[in-house]
Image: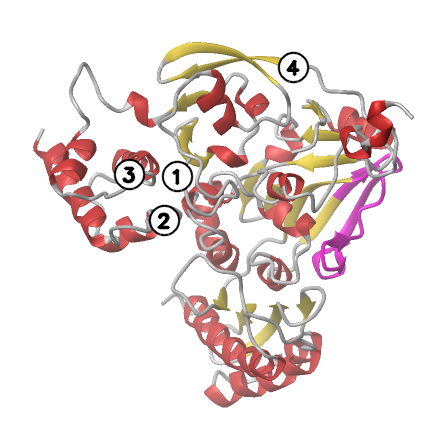
Amino acid sequence: MKDFTYAAPATLQEATRLLTAANGSARILAGGTDIIVQLREGLRDAGQVIDVKKIPELMELSFSPQHGLRLGAAVPCYCIYENAEIAKAYPALVDSARIIGGWQIQSRASIGGNLCNSSPAADSIPSLIAHHAFAEVVGPAGKRKVAVESFCTAPGRNVLQQGELLVALVFPPTMPHSGSAYERFIPRNEMDIAVVGVGTRVQLNQACDKIEFARIGLAAVAPTPKFAQEASEWLAGKPLAEETYAQAGELAKKVATPISDMRGPAEYRTHLVGVLVKRTLEKAVERAKGK
Amino acid sequence: MGRLEAYPTLLQTNHLGQANPVAKKTHVSTTVNNEPAEFLCEPRESLLEVLRDTLKLTGAKEGCNNGNCGACTVLLNDVPVNSCLVLGVEAEGASIETVEGMACEGHLHPLQQCFLEGAALQCGICTPGFLVTAKALLDKNPTPSEHDIRFNLANNLCRCTGYDKIVKAVQEAAKELAAK
């Protein structure tokens, strides 16, 4: 690995000052499960590595049913699924956090880091989209909010400008009769990169026989994770039926523009969008009903 | 032309072509296997390199060096991590447990004993990682199901034995620990 300097600032102010002074040559270290590999393999360069785990705002994990969830950008995955209240309120997020690598990776890797790594196949981003989370970004010009579906701009690239860092992911409060799920397709049981990943969230009506509101996020089918807007909006007012979920899957396929690679040909991936939208909607509805 | 200029890769430059200040070694105070430990390391050195090369604790092994194989697993503040994906400087103030800390007063940990008796290893490179992860699992969940064991050991790869003997050894150790 090439030489670099190391800093572990204790405040956001200090972190943005260091990032600005580094003039683009600094890299942020949260869990390190991507950046250390990338630095070692020469895929990214760093004059300075800035460890953000000493900054309280990036390690914050707070939840209340009224205010929702604030997930600091450097909070490791295991803290999410070991918190029973959060696990109940944001099941798609928990589905994602439990399958990003194995235990050793989940001890270090953060959801914020997964978003900033901006892989098209990131396991957490479809769930973030489904949960309608937004990214809180701080930089020299102050604070701004970015919808998670607009965060990634290309493989490995995102909206963060020089001097900016992701502070937290903010999730709206959960509503009654709502449920969510994330599933990915991989040819093995565990420990693989998604061929396709889909996260969905549904909110049902009082009688629990119709969908009131839905959001569908897709991964590994385009240069960036995608919000399947047309499919999501179409679901409003639809009955809970297999045909509903299948039709939403067909509509979601419209935003899929996958490539063919070692993980699967484009047609197969598009087909999988339909399958996984249907499966995750079924699971999300079951969870919404409290089953 | 100076010697370094003839070999541009020897010059430390960032992606903008500017010279990087060569990082000084950092002093790190930490706890390893319940004993205070201090070391000097460069920021780019991994915790695995520090453990093996500086502290001479060669139990943790370098397998893939990119987080896939788990042979370098240690506990960092009680959770299992791949020490190849931790910088040595991040260990400041932390508590680290390695496979060397598992045996107690000359007696092998029940997991170590069960791995030996159950022949749950062949070449042994993956074994320290399996032992450390399995210890973390039994500390958290003393009665894991077979699924729990396989799920939690998924980040540890063995290329010799297959996994059945390893899973059985963990089950045996769990029984022994419960009987104590």
Residue at the disc numbered 4:
B25
- How far across and down, in percent of the image, does residue A174 sit? 55, 57
Earlier residue among tags 4 and 2: 4
Answer with mark 4 or mark 1, whichever residue precedes in sequence: 4
Q: How far, Cα to Cα, is label 1 from label 3?
A: 10 Å
Q: CA distance from mark 3 to mark 2?
A: 11 Å
Residue at 60% of width from left, 45% of height from top? A34
Residue with the mark numbered 2:
B157
- Between A49 and A134, the one lying in front of the other is A49
Per the rendering, the mark at residue B71 is 1
- Other residues around mark 1 within 10 Å, as few (<14) / some (14–19) / many (≥20): many
Q: Is residue B23 left or right of residue B176?
A: right
Residue found at the very far bottom of the displayed protein = A243
Q: Is residue A46 above or below residue A208?
A: above
Tell me where the magenta segment starts and ends, as one range.
Answer: A137-164
Amino acid type shown at disc 3: Gly
